[in-house]
Image (cartoon, rainbow, N blue to C red):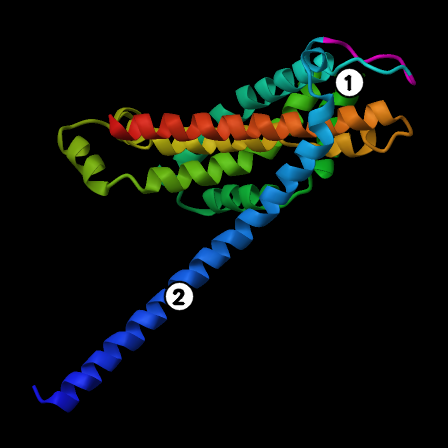
Amino acid sequence: MSRPALTRAAGHINRRAIWSRIVIAACYGAGAIVVLPLALIVWHLLAKGLPALSLSFFLDMPKPVGEPGGGMANAIVGTLILVGLGTLFAVPVGVGAGVYLAEFGRGRFSSLVRYTADLLSGVPSIVVGVAAYGLVVLPMGGFSALAGGVALGILMLPTIIRSTEEMVRLVPQSYREAALALGAPRWKVTQQVVIPAARAGIVTASMLAVARAAGETAPLLFYGRTPYDDWNRQAWTGALVLVMMVTGISAVLRLTVRRVAQR
């Protein structure tokens, strides 16, 4: 190859290297832009909520109006109860619906189920609360933890359904064909082959839905606008605890999925 040709080739390689570095830098910048709002939110929550974070916040009941001190033991226990009830309601229904859509969902009814799940994912939480009020509170004649669990379960359903469907679809078709070739019925193939193969993804979808339900903090907006400074501090601390709870769930989720994937 002549010297001019070598020079042109070298210049072309240099331009490609420069563009590669520019694109990589742009990707890093985009990632930083995504992380920055979360970092600012966490920093703001730490600044506002950390001063009131103590053991009494988790163990003590709220004080009467105007008195300093107290905690949110009842709110924390109530959150755990509501999230637990919502999980008991949403996970079996959502996983079952997702498996149905992925394995047997053909026709108008399956299209209706998908459309309903997509529609529920965009419904504001306040509308879901109104729906739970009409479905549970009015027939029962009063408020209850069951009503809150149903509301959170409805919020969790679309995430579980659509994510489970996608995870089940990722299972290779050869798994199904091999099991069917051995004479296993379709339902048994789904139960003993497909679902175990998609277990990590189903667990991921369920935990993400639980994290979303635990992170519903709309009531704190009203609690945090009271004229009492101590209540405001506790509201910020409650928001910080919710963020910590969601972060903990996400960490457990990653460890669980990693261990399941390594088996």
Q: Is 77 rendered above or below residue 232? A: above
Residue at which label 1 appears: 143
- In three-dimensional space, the C-alpha distance between marks 2 and 1, rounded to whole angstroms, equals 55 Å
Rendered residue at 35%/71% (across/down): 19
Residue 155 appears left or right of 110:
right
Is residue 255 positioned above or below 31 on the image? above
Q: Is residue 203 left or right of residue 15?
A: right
Packing grade of label 2 (10 A; few <14, some 14-19, many >=20) is few
Circle number at residue 23 = 2
Q: Residue 93 at what x, y percent from top left?
A: 50, 27
Image spot of residue 247 (x, y percent): 53, 30
Let me know if residue 107 appears in the view.
yes
Secondary structure at numbered mark 2:
helix
Looking at the rendering, the stretch of residues picked out in magenta corresponds to 60-66
Seen at 70% across and 34% down, the residue is 47
Judging depth in this view, the residue of 153 and 233 nearest the camera is 233
Compared with 185, 59 (above or below) is above
Question: What amino acid is labelled 2 in the image?
Answer: Val
Q: Which quadrant is home to the N terminus?
A: bottom left
Q: Is residue 135 shown to the viewer in this render?
A: no
Tell me the quadrant of the picture where the C terminus can be found. top left
